[in-house]
Image (cartoon, rainbow, N blue to C red):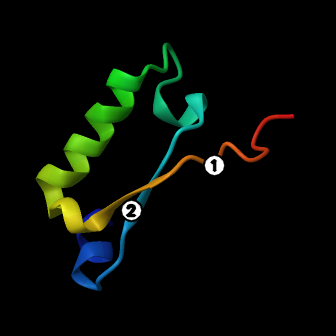
Amino acid sequence: MISALADHGGVMGMCFAPAFVDKEKATVERLVDHIDHIIELVGPDHVGLGSDLDGIYS
């Protein structure tokens, strides 16, 4: 899925919501692990930062 997105010029937006980062213990280091994984798969041109901190939790 990620490769197909990149093949079509898309960008994978990384969500900072703790439940999406790691259900056990969400940390900045764990988020960076996700970002590094996407970069290893398809390169840095296809990863973006989208914090989604504008109301995901009330």
Q: Which of 24 and 13 is in front in this view?
A: 13
Q: Quadrant of the N terminus?
A: bottom left
The structure residue drawn at horizontal position 53% and vertical position 39%, both measured from the top left corner, is 16
Mark 2: amino acid: Met
Q: Is residue 51 left or right of residue 38?
A: right
As helix, strand or loop, the secondary structure at mark 1 comes to loop
Q: What residue type is labelled 1?
A: Asp
Q: How far apart are marks 1 and 2 (CA)?
A: 13 Å
Q: Is residue 25 positioned above or below 11 on the image?
A: above
State the quadrant of the C terminus.
Answer: top right
Q: Position of residue 21 (x, y in %)?
A: 47, 32
Residue pictured at 67% horizontal, 42% vertical: 53
Task: Identify the mark at residue 52; answer none if there is no mark.
Answer: 1
Is 56 situated left or right of 6 in this image?
right
Residue at x-position 59% and y-position 36% = 17
Q: Are marks 1 and 2 in contact (CB under 8 Å)?
A: no
Residue at the farthest right position: 58
Q: Quadrant of residue 43?
A: bottom left
**Lateral position of residue 29 relative to residue 58, left or right:** left
Q: Tag 1: Cα neighbours inside 10 Å, few (<14), some, or many (≥20)?
A: few
Q: Quadrant of residue 12?
A: bottom left
Q: Classify 10 Å Cα crowding around label 2: few (below 14), some (14-19), many (20 and above).
A: many
Q: Which residue is drawn at the image coordinates 31% and 39% (left, top)?
A: 34
Q: Which dot marks residue 18? A: none
**Secondary structure of the residue carrying numbered label 2:** strand
Residue at numbered disc 2: 12
Disc nearer the start of the sequence (1/2): 2
Horizontal and vertical percent for residue 48?
38, 59
Residue 23, given in percent of the width and then of the height, sits at: 53, 22
Between circles 1 and 2, the one closer to the viewer is 1
Measuring from the top left, give residue 24's x and y in whole percent.
50, 14
